[in-house]
Image: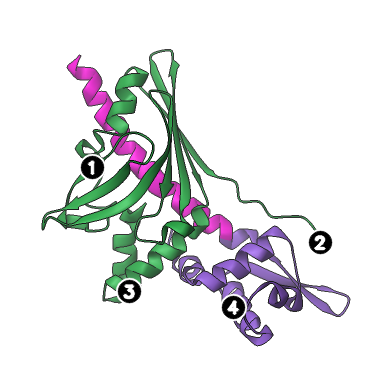
Chain colours: A purple, B green
Amino acid sequence: MDPTAQLSALADPTRRKVFELVRKQPRPVGALAEKLPISRPAVSQHLKVLAGAGLVQASMDGTRRIYTVNPTGLEKLRRWVDDQWEQVLDTFEEAARREAGKS
Amino acid sequence: MTTSHRLHPVVKTRVVPIEADRAFTLFTERAGEWWPLTTHSIAGADAVGIRFETGVGGVVVELTAAGGEHIWAEVTEWDPPHRFVLNWHPRIDPVAASTLEVSFSPVEGGTRVTLEHYGWERFGAEAEELRESYEGGWEVVLENYTGNI
């Protein structure tokens, strides 16, 4: 499980904001640009990177392109985070078992 | 097209064969005894311990062989032996922190430990910090970053 693309895409704070806005509500580029202190072309560029990482996708609403979250990429990232905690809890459980053996 | 896409927390549970108060202490004050530091830390092989300051406002700090310290988190809620909450931000701006909540409840044969991680998508920020700190590209970054939770 290698979420490099997703991690890399979300590393940029502005891009993370774009993603969080899309996550809260599907929106077209213009609506995103209104909410952010960056130009519309800059928003488009961030969306392109997020789409490339499989985190957002575009769908057509008439002639407008609306951006929504792509659950597949997000799920990949989630599973990876989940796996990290799995490893930490594994070692905690081992320590607890050793602790139980002491008493 | 108006559905909000909510990110549910990552939730993990385990049942361990010790009482809640011992489980709580082991998970917090005694974290340095069992935490997989080599793989789950900022300094990796150079990480030697954890200082977990108990109580609200306490910090969780990784200790390195060279005497360095890396802050991972601050305690925002503290209710031993039931529950604690951390503002979790290894290597990232605390403003972008995620939330880690761990609770302990007595069950037959021991204690159920439930770990919930909210805002996990912000892990990307940690990875970026690491990319700036380590040379050698993503392979190295991920190798070290794995430990960053």
| Residues drawn in magenta | A74-103
- Mark drawn on residue B51: 1
Considering only order in the chain, which callout, 1 or 2, is on the residue closer to the N terminus?
Answer: 2
The residue drawn where x is 38% and y is 23% is B81
Q: Chain of mark 1?
A: B
Residue at 61% in and 84% down = A42
| SS at mark 1 in the image | strand
Q: Say whether marks 4 and 1 touch (CB < 8 Å).
A: no
| Within-10-Å neighbours for mark 3: few <14, some 14–19, many 20+ | few
Name, please, the residue furthest toward the right. A62
- Whole-percent x, y for residue A30 in the image: 75, 78
Query: What amino acid does circle 1 point to?
Result: Arg
In this rendering, the answer to whether A84 lies above or below A89 is: below
Q: Which mark is residue B132?
A: 3
Residue B110 numbered tag:
none
Q: Which mark is residue A46?
A: 4
Are the residues flagged by discs 2 and 3 from a single subunit?
yes
Q: Position of residue B136 (x, y in %)?
A: 27, 76
Chain ID of residue with mark 4: A
Q: Nearer the viewer, residue B55 or B148?
A: B55
Residue with the mark numbered 2: B1
Within-10-Å neighbours for mark 4: few <14, some 14–19, many 20+: many
Q: CA distance from mark 3 to mark 4?
A: 20 Å
